[in-house]
Image (cartoon, rainbow, N blue to C red):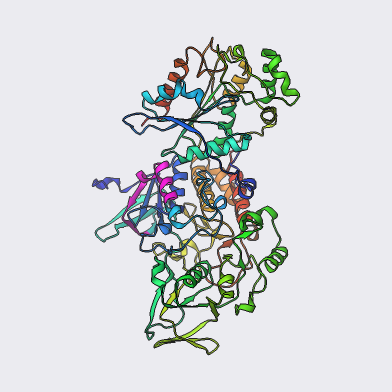
Amino acid sequence: MQDTPDIADRHDAVCVIGAGASGLATVKNLREQGFSVDCYERETSVGGAWNWRHDRSPVYASMHLVSSRPLTEFPDFPMPDDWPDYPHHTRLLTYLERYADHFGLRDSIWFGTEVVAVTPAGDGRWEVTTRSTGGGAERVQRYAAVVAANGHNWAPKPLSVDTSGFRGKVMHASAFKDPAQLRGRRVLVVGGGNSGCDIAVEAAQQAETVWHSTRRGYWYAPKYLFGRPLDQMLLHWRLPQWLYERVLRLAVGDLTRFGLPAPDHRPYESHPVVNSQLAYYLGHGRITAVGDVARMEGSTVELADGRRIDPDLVVTATGYLPHFGFLAPELLDMDEDGRPDLHLHTFARKHPTLAVVGLVQSDAGLFPLAHWQSVAVARWLRLRLTDPDRAAAVQQKESSRPLRSWTRLKVVPSSRHWFEVGHLSYLRAVQGLLDEMEPAR
Amino acid sequence: MSPRVLRTEDWTAPVPPVKREVLSALPHPDDGRPPLLFVPGLGHAAWSFREHWLGHAATRGFPAYAISPRERGTLRAYVHDVVQAAAGLPRQTVLIGHGFGALVVAHALARYPARAAVLSAPLLNGWAAVGAALRANPAGALPGLLGRPVRLSGPQLGLADTARVAGVPARLCRELIMAPDPGEPVGAPPTLVLGSPDDRVVTRRALDAAAARYGGAPLLFPGMGHDLMLAPGWEEPIDAVLDWLLKELPS
C-alpha cells in the first residue's frame, strides 16, 4: 500500500470484503460497471472456502461438488467442458485462480488484509477500518459503497454437547484434509449434511468402524437420476414438491430400514443432501446409523436412546454459521440469532450502498447466484449515480416484491436453512430486478 | 435489454464436449497484450487465418488463436466452443469473427465478456445473405434449396483458388436464416465492424445495418472480396484491426 496519508478518501471506489468465489465475481462485475474497487482478503491468495490451504477453509479431502458443473460455473466463464459432472475441490480452486487471472482481478485485491470495522460515514458513504492479518496498525478509508462477500462456511457451529471430558480425538470436518486420518480408527461422524455424509462414506472405506449420527431424517438424493446429474433432471422436469417426493421415494426408497430416521419435512424444505453412496455403505454394514449424541465422557459416547458407543475419533460435521464481526448487527437488520434480513438476501434494507453477496444456499450451485447478485449490486450502484430518480423508483417497486417469490418460507427450523432459496425462483426475481434497472427505451 | 439470467437449456442439456482444433501464433516476448481469437465463417476453418492473419498479429505483439468449427456442429455448439476456447485462454480475449463466424461471435458476446470484438464482413442477416448468394452464384446456392450443400465460388469470395473452401451444409444455411437475436453483449466490449463495399456475400446494406447495431460506421476496404483474410491486400484490414485495438485498449 502507498504511504501517502491523503488517499484515505477513496471517493467513488467500492470496498469488497473477501476474495473467494463471491468476492471475485463482485470485483469483476463492479469493474465491468466502471467502478474502481478495493477488495480486502485476510488470506494471501484467492479462492476463499475453496482454497484448502486457508485455515478457515471448510473443504475436506474427498470433497466433490454436489451440484453439477453447468449449474455451478459462473455463467460468463464456463468451466472446461471436458471436466467431470462433479469436479473435485482442487479443480474448483484452479478454476477460481484462472478466473482471477483471466479478468486481471488481483490488481484490485489487497491480500493479507483484514477488515476490522465498517461504519456509516453519513451520505451513504462508509468508513472501512483494515489491518494487516498478522496485526499492526489500523487504517481507515472512506468508500462510496461496501459489499461483504465474506462467505458463510468458515465459522464452525459448535457441537451442542460438552467434549471436554472425552478422551478420544474430536475434530471438525474442516480439519479433515487427508483420508489417512481415518485409517484404522473407530470413527463417529456427527451431522447429516453433505459433508457429514461424504465423510461417513469416506470413513466407510478407510476406518475400522463407522457410526453416523444424525439428529433428524433427511431426504438423501442420488447424484444421478437416469444417468443424468440430479439437479439437471430436476430443472428439466421442474417437478412440484409432491412429485419430487414421489421420485425420491421411488429412486432412493425407504431408508428407515437402515436405521435412519424418517424425514420430518418435505423435500425442498431443507438444503438438499446429495449422496448416492450412504445407503450403499449402510447396506454393507460399513456404516451404522445412530441418533443424536447426548453425552461424551471418558472413552464412551452416550446416544440419545441410551446406547453407548466407543469411538476414538469424532468428526463433527455440524455446519457453519454466517458471521459479520465487522458490521454492527442493525446495519444488516439482524435478528437475535444473528440472521440478517436483506432484500433478495443481498441488499441492506436501510442502507442502499451496503450489500452482501453469496449469503444464499440453493438446490444448485452458488457461483451463478453470487454472479447475478453482484451484477445486480453493480448495476444498482451505477443507477444510483446516473439516474437517482429511477433508482428511487426501482427501490420503491422492489420493496413490494413478495418475499415468497424468491425465498422458501417453509423450511426446517434450523440455523442452516433460513437462507435456502430455489435456484429458478431466486434467479427469476434477480432477472426481474435487472429488467427494472434497465434504462427505458 | 438486460442479460438473460435463466438459461435452462444450458443447465439441463449442456452441449456435448468435443476436441477442438485451435491453431495459434504467439509473440516473443509476450508483453501481456490481450489474446485474439479468430472465428472462421462458412466453408472455412482455422487454416484460413493461419495463412496470413495469425502470424501477422503475432509479429505485432498479439497472441493470436483461430478455432475450427466442430464437425456436424450447430450455431449453439459453435457458440459454446468459442466461449470455451476464449475462457480457456490466460487473459480476457478479443473475439474476431468473420462472415458466419461474426454471427457466432455476436452470440458468444452475450455469454462471455470479451475484451473487445471485431465483426469482419458479418453475416448477421440470413435472408439478405440468401439473396446475395442467389445473385452472385445461383449455381452454387440453388442446391441449398433442395437440402444439398451450398458451394461458394471464387468470384463470390474474391479468391483465385477455392480448393480448400468446403461446401456448406444446407442445415447451417437454415440455422443462419432462423438464428435468434444474439442479445446484448455482456460487459459492453468496444466493437468494430469492417467489410468491403464490393463483398458479394455480405451486402453493403447488411454491413451498414450491422455497424449501426454495434454503434458505428463500418470500416471499408474497397476492391476486396468477402474473404478479407485470404485475398490479396490482406495486410490492410488486419493492420486496421490491430491499430484499432491498440487505440481502444490502452495497456
Quarter-wise, where is residue A244 in the image? bottom right
Q: Which residues are magenta?
A: A94-117
Q: Residue at x 58, y 73 (%)?
A: A413
Quarter-wise, where is residue B144 in the image? top right
Q: Nearer the viewer, residue A338 or A69?
A: A69
Q: Is residue B223 above or below residue B183?
A: above
Query: Residue B133: x, y in percent?
Result: 67, 17
**Residue closest to the far bottom:** A306
Counting every numbered tag in the picture gives 0
Q: Quadrant of the C terminus of chain B?
A: top left
Query: Residue A246: x, y in percent?
Result: 72, 66
Query: Residue A8: x, y in percent?
Result: 30, 48
Residue A295 appears in view = yes
Q: Is residue A195 above or below residue A229?
A: below
Horizontally, is A354 left or right of A6 in the view? right
Query: Residue A205: x, y in percent?
Result: 48, 70
Asked if the stretch drawn in magenta spans residue A104, the answer is: yes
Q: Nearer the viewer, residue B81 or A56?
A: B81
Q: Residue at x 50, y 25 (%)?
A: B47
**Residue closest to the far top:** B223
Q: Quadrant of the N terminus of chain B?
A: top right
Residue A441 appears in view = no
Asked if the stretch drawn in magenta spans residue A66, the answer is: no
